[in-house]
Amino acid sequence: MNTTVDPVLRRLVDEQGAGLARGSGVTAPIAAVVIAEPGDRLTGLHGTLVLAVGARGDEAVALVRSAAAAGAAAVAVRGEVLPTPVHEAAAETGTPVLGIPAAVRWDTVEAEARRVIGESGGAGRATAQAEARRVPGADGGGGEDPVRAEVHGGRGETGGAGGSGPAVPHGDLFSLVQTVATLTRGVVSVEDTAHRVLAYSAGNDEADELRRRSILGRSCPEPYLALLREQGVYRRVRAGDGVVEVDARPELGARRRLVAGINAGSRPLGTLWVQEGDRPLAERADEVLRGAARLAASQLVDHYFHGDPSARLSSRAGLAHGLLTGRFDATALAAHLGIAPSASAAVVAVDLRVGEQPGDAGSGSGVSGSPSLDVCLAEAAGIVSVHAAAYRRNALVTLACGQIYAMLPDSDRTRQEDDGTGLVRWAGDVVAALRRHTGSAVQAVVAGTAARLDEIPAVKLRGHRALGLLARTPDRPVATYGELTAALLVRDVLDLMDRNTGLRHPGVTALLAHDREHNSELSRSLLRYLDGFGDAARVAKDLNVHPNTLRYRVRKALAVTGLDLNDPEHRLAATLHLRLAAEEEASDCPAGQPWPVNAVP
């Protein structure tokens, strides 16, 4: 059963020395505790103890009346001796008001009230109602002391009951900070311009004393804030998208930190922090932080303007997918996504190949279907998004065909700065990060650049085909479409021959039958000889045979097939047919061995 008002208030009066202005009428049971500040819109507070943080004088009176109108069971304000107007508001509204001494922290009041609620079985409802709320700093007053959002198990939200803005859901900011923590090896948090913690990474074993006091104690020490102001940290991060390093201050319990501003144009929206843990931060932690700050900007815009960031993210992801697949008009999409319709865009395709280790040849299908793969894809897409945003401000990342695609719009500046090698280096960095995170043989293809946004789907298809080919060489992490063009052309021809059994050279067909009948290696030797441009010495060394043995095999193969190696068309036809045969044999032989193991010359 729920605790009535009297036991909760009595505990706070007896153990914390709180003053009490009793209301009139029948008191309601308390089942939850929330935080409210002056100006907050209060609704649906039945059975709730409201902690009126930062409210003094007329603001306290107004908040008492507002909370009472919302159905609050009781209100706590700062001040052991309550002024007459507060007593009058309590009497008029019938709502009890507690006066909290200045020496008692608000988090102590909250913990004590929740303890009483829990002792009487109301903790479950209290926890549910407290999932979205704001928890203030220690002094409860105004000024420059920061306000911290309480976080339960790595999930914190602003707003909710008594909040001034919408909650920031777990699926966006929290996913983002967790991705940043993974990439940087640090402890990560996002704060708004009032120093409220909006989200932070789960698992805080490596959090320093300052971070623990900021999140668990809901109060950042003023000496550290003064230090940041003195060093001009906030001024510098608000001036652009640079990353600022803040040195460790052991005397303040603070380890080394990096901070980036989250800005919408010239308007500051907040800051993104990464604190160094037991290990040094990753080598390119600053680039990760810069990209993540750009991604966080759109989410904080929604936060400030009471939008729905989860809906916005879903919409942006859907539109990005439409741009990639050509389902929507590219010009209209470009305007909505903030990209110039005339912009060109590079496309990079990424295949996780989950479960395959580097060195394992695979199909590279990357088709989604299992929950575990879907989770891996979502996490990997977050990592790619952070890297992409750091590389190109308007980058778009989406999933398609079980693979990840990054669309990187060009500007005049990026075209001048990137000679093509920069994009390959970027793709290499992304693959390296994903391989470390997933342990899989992740591969990427720089598919090319679409001259216009409506050409992106065609470039995407090139990337998809190239990934399938690249899977045959899993030790190769990154390739460009240009590097794979010849192999893709051969692949198309072999696929055509595979579908049409009439496209065969009869002489090569006879040679393959001869090898099967006599358990010989004439076919394999001839293909290696053709691939080696007739260099008998080198090919024989690769085959671990004497050059005269190789020459004998080639002469015998020519006798069986009737091929004339002086004719380039004979050489081409033989090479294609032998390649196709090797692939067919490889699919049937153990360990991918495409030719008889114990063959005779």
Image: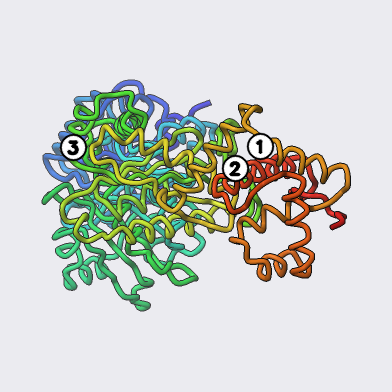
Quadrant assignment, res 35: top left
- Which amino acid, by three-letter code, is at mark 1? His
Q: How is the image coloured?
A: rainbow
Q: Secondary structure at mark 1?
A: loop
Q: Which residue carries the number 3 mark?
A: 86
Using the numbered discs, state the Cα–Cα distance from disc 1 to disc 2 in whole angstroms.
Answer: 7 Å
Using the numbered discs, state the Cα–Cα distance from disc 3 to disc 2 in whole angstroms.
Answer: 96 Å
Residue 469: where, in percent of width, then height?
54, 45
Q: Which residue carries the number 1 mark?
A: 505
- Which amino acid, by three-letter code, is at mark 3? Val
Q: Is residue 179 above or below residue 46?
A: below
Report the label total: 3
Q: Secondary structure at mark 2?
A: helix
Q: Is residue 206 left or right of residue 544?
A: left
Residue 15 visible to the viewer: no
Q: Residue at x 19, y 44 (%)?
A: 55
Could you classify mark 3 by the number of other residues whose Cα lies within 10 Å: few (under 14), some (14-19), or many (20 or more)? Answer: many
Closer to the eye: label 3 or 2: 2
Mark 1 or 3, nearer chain start: 3
Q: Is residue 62 above or below residue 284?
A: above
Q: Which residue carries the number 2 mark?
A: 573
Q: Residue at x 19, y 25 (%)?
A: 92
Mark 3 or 2, nearer chain start: 3
